[in-house]
Image (cartoon, helix red, strand yellow):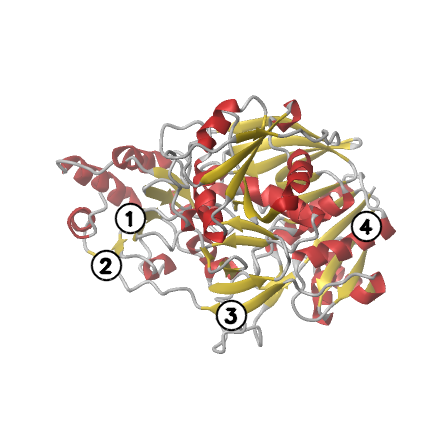
C-alpha cells in the first residue's frame, strides 16, 4: 500500500511544510503519492513531481478548490483514499482543519501532530503541551496522520520525475463560502521555518516597542514571534503567536524577550537548539529552559544588543 | 435559535503535568481539574448570542466520567440553560466523542454547535471538524470573531498566514479560539441557580455509539530535559557567547 500526502500550496508554490510532511510520509511507506487539490496550480504539480521522494502526483483542479475549504477538499481525498494505507498532512492550520474531516468520513481515529514515526502504525506525539510524549499505535486499517513539521527535515525538491495523473474534481460544497484572507506580507523569514526567532511578551508593554525587536530581527534575519499575552493585548497580530495553541518553532536560536515562560508558551519553543531569555524577573520560568539567561530591563538590553551586533564583523545568514 | 456547546473536563492549565512512573499516563490523582480553556470561550460566545436576543436556548454537553458534570455545572452557572452528560469510562477518542455528539444533535436539532478548537490534554484538535463531517455541516474552525447575519454566520478564523473570513450557512459547527472573547466568571447567585438546572445523563450504549479506542497508548514518557543553562552578566557577554560558544549568529 502507499501513502497519500495532501499538499499544502497557494496555487503557485508548494508551502514549505509540505516538504517536511513528505519526509514523514516516506518514513511510513516509501511509495509516497502527493494529492494536489487546487485551481490553476499546474506549476505546483510540476514542482512536486520533481521531488525525489514523490512517486506520483495526483492533480485535481476546480474553481471551488481555490481557497482550500475543508468541505470541498475532504470528499475528494475520501474518494481517492481507497488504495492508500496512510493519509498524511502537516499539523498546521491547513492540516488541522482538513484531516479530521477526512478521518471522520472514513471512520478512522486520527493521530494528530506526530513528532516521530516508529513504524507504519506506531508514532510518538506530544500531549499536555509537550509535557509528556505518548507512543501510540493505530489499529485502524487505514491511518489518518498529521505531522509536526518542525520534527521532520524538509525533503529534497529535485532529483525526481514522478508522473502527474489528472483526476476528476468532486462537487462543490455550497454551504460554506470563502470571503477573504488577510495575509501579513513580510520580507522576514517565516516563523515556522526561520533559523532565528526573536519573540516578545507582555514585558514589551505596547505594540510600538516591538520596533526594538524588529530592529534586531532585521539584523539577524530572524522571524518575529510573540507570547499569547502579547497577541491578546494587541501588541502584535495572531500569526506571530508561539505556543500550545499557536505555532511550534524549532529554530537554531530562540530569543525570548519579556516573556515569563508559561508552560503554554514553552510548548511552542522549548525544542529550539539554543534559547536565550531576557527578562528583568530573575525568577521567571523562562530561565529554566534558557541556555543563556540575561536578567535585565529589556528596554536597556535590546538597544545594547543591537549595538553589540553592529560591532560584529559578520553575522550568519 | 438553539445552541449546543460541547465542553471537556481537563487538568487545569496552570498545573505542571507529571508523567506516571510506570509510563501508563499522567498523574491525575489529587490534581486540580477545570474546564478546557477554549471551551469557556465557546460557552461565553453562546451566552453573548443569547443575551443579544438571537438565541433562545443553550445546552451544555460533555462526554466523560461522572465528575465531568462539574464542567457542565460551570457552563450552567455562566448561562447555559440545561446540561447533558454522556457518561463514559477511560479514554474516549475525538471520533467517538463526535459520534456521541452527532446523536445528540440529531435529537436536539441545534442551529449551532460551539466548542473549543482543541483540548489542552490530548491536544488533538479534531472533534469539531469530525462532528461537522459526520453531519455534513459547514465547519468554521479556530474562530476569533463571529457575526450572525440571519441564517448565515460570518466567521474570522485564525490561520498560520494571518486571518481568514468565511461565511457558513446554519446549521454549522464553530470551534473557538481563545481570542474569540473574554470568558466571564460565574457569580455566586448564578452558581446556586445552576444547581437547580437539569442535567440529563446518557451512556454511550444508550445512544448506540461504539466508543472503543482505536489508538492504543503504548507508553507515556517525560520529554527530554534541557540541560541547565547559565546566566550572563551583560549583553556583551551574551553576544560573545552566541557568536563564539553557541556559534548561532
Residue at image mark 2: B231
Depth-wise, is mark 2 or mark 3 nearer the camera?
Answer: 3
> Between B39 and B75, which is closer to the camera in this rendering?
B39
Residue A104: horizontal and vertical position, in percent? Answer: 69, 49
Q: CA distance from mark 4 to mark 2?
A: 56 Å
Give me the residue at 59% from left, 66% from top.
B216
Where does residue A164 sit, x and y in percent of width and height? 53, 30
Say which residue appears at 67% left-offset and 42% top-offset: A78
Q: Residue A310 at what x, y percent from top left?
A: 17, 35
Both marks 1 and 2 on one chain? no
Numbered disc 2: secondary structure: strand
Q: Is residue A200 left or right of residue A167?
A: left
Q: Is residue B197 visible?
A: no
Residue B213 position within the rendered picture, expressed as x and y whole percent measured from the top left: 66, 64
Figure quadrant of residue A304 = top left
* First in residue order: circle 2 vs circle 3: 3
Same chain assignment for discs 4 and 3: yes
Amino acid at each position: 500500500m502507499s501513502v497519500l500526502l495532501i499538499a499544502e500550496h497557494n496555487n503557485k508554490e508548494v508551502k514549505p511544510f509540505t516538504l517536511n510532511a513528505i519526509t514523514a510520509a516516506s518514513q511510513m511507506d516509501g511509495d509516497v503519492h502527493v494529492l494536489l487539490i487546487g485551481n490553476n496550480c499546474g506549476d505546483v504539480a510540476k514542482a512536486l513531481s520533481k521531488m525525489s521522494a514523490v512517486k506520483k502526483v495526483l492533480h485535481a483542479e476546480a474553481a471551488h478548490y481555490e481557497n482550500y475549504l475543508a468541505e470541498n477538499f475532504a470528499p475528494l481525498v475520501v474518494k481517492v483514499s481507497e488504495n492508500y494505507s496512510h493519509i498524511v498532512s502537516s499539523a498546521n492550520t491547513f492540516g488541522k482543519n482538513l484531516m479530521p474531516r477526512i478521518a471522520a468520513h472514513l471512520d478512522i481515529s486520527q493521530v494528530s501532530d506526530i513528532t516521530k514515526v516508529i513504524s507504519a502504525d506506531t508514532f510518538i506525539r506530544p500531549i499536555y503541551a509537550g509535557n509528556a510524549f505518548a507512543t501510540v499505535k493505530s489499529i485502524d486499517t487505514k491511518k489518518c496522520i498529521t505531522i509536526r513539521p518542525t520534527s521532520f527535515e524538509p525533503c529534497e525538491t529535485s532529483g525526481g520525475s514522478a508522473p502527474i495523473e489528472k483526476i476528476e474534481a468532486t462537487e462543490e460544497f455550497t454551504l460554506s463560502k470563502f470571503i477573504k484572507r488577510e495575509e501579513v506580507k513580510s520580507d522576514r523569514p517565516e516563523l515556522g521555518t526561520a533559523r532565528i526567532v526573536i519573540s516578545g511578551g507582555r514585558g514589551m508593554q505596547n505594540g510600538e516597542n516591538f520596533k526594538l525587536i524588529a530592529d534586531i530581527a532585521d539584523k539577524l534575519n530572524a522571524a518575529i514571534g510573540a507570547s499569547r499575552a502579547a497577541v491578546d493585548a494587541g501588541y502584535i497580530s495572531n500569526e506571530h503567536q508561539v505556543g500550545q495553541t499557536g505555532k511550534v518553532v524549532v529554530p537554531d536560536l530562540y530569543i525570548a524577550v519579556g516573556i515569563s515562560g508559561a508552560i503554554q508558551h514553552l510548548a511552542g519553543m522549548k525544542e529550539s537548539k539554543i534559547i536565550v531569555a531576557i527578562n528583568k524577573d530573575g525568577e521567571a520560568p523562562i530561565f529554566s529552559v534558557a541556555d543563556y539567561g540575561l536578567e535585565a530591563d529589556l528596554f536597556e538590553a535590546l538597544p545594547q544588543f543591537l549595538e553589540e551586533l553592529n560591532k560584529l564583523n559578520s553575522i550568519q545568514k | 435559535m438553539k445552541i449546543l456547546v460541547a465542553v471537556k473536563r481537563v487538568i487545569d492549565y496552570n498545573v505542571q503535568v507529571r508523567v506516571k512512573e510506570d509510563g501508563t499516563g499522567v498523574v491525575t490523582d489529587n490534581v486540580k481539574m477545570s474546564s478546557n480553556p477554549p471551551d469557556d470561550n465557546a460557552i461565553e460566545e453562546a451566552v453573548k448570542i443569547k443575551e443579544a436576543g438571537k438565541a433562545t436556548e443553550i445546552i451544555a454537553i460533555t462526554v466523560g466520567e461522572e465528575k465531568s458534570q462539574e464542567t457542565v455545572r460551570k457552563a450552567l452557572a455562566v448561562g447555559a440553560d440545561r446540561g447533558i452528560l454522556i457518561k463514559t469510562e477511560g479514554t474516549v477518542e475525538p471520533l467517538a466523542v463526535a459520534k456521541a455528539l452527532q446523536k445528540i444533535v440529531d435529537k436536539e436539532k441545534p442551529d449551532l454547535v460551539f466548542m473549543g478548537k482543541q483540548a489542552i490534554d490530548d491536544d488533538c484538535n479534531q472533534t469539531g471538524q469530525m462532528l461537522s463531517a459526520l453531519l455534513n455541516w459547514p465547519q468554521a474552525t479556530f474562530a476569533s470573531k463571529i457575526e450572525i447575519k440571519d441564517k448565515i454566520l460570518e466567521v474570522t478564523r485564525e490561520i498560520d498566514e494571518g486571518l481568514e473570513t468565511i461565511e457558513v450557512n446554519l446549521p454549522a459547527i464553530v470551534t473557538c479560539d481563545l481570542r474569540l472573547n473574554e470568558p466571564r466568571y460565574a457569580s455566586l447567585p448564578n452558581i446556586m441557580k445552576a444547581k437547580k438546572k437539569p442535567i440529563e445523563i446518557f451512556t454511550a450504549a444508550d445512544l448506540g455509539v461504539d466508543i472503543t479506542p482505536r489508538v492504543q497508548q503504548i507508553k507515556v514518557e517525560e520529554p527530554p530535559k534541557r540541560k541547565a543553562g547559565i546566566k550572563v552578566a551583560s549583553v556583551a557577554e551574551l553576544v560573545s557567547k552566541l557568536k563564539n560558544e553557541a556559534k548561532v549568529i
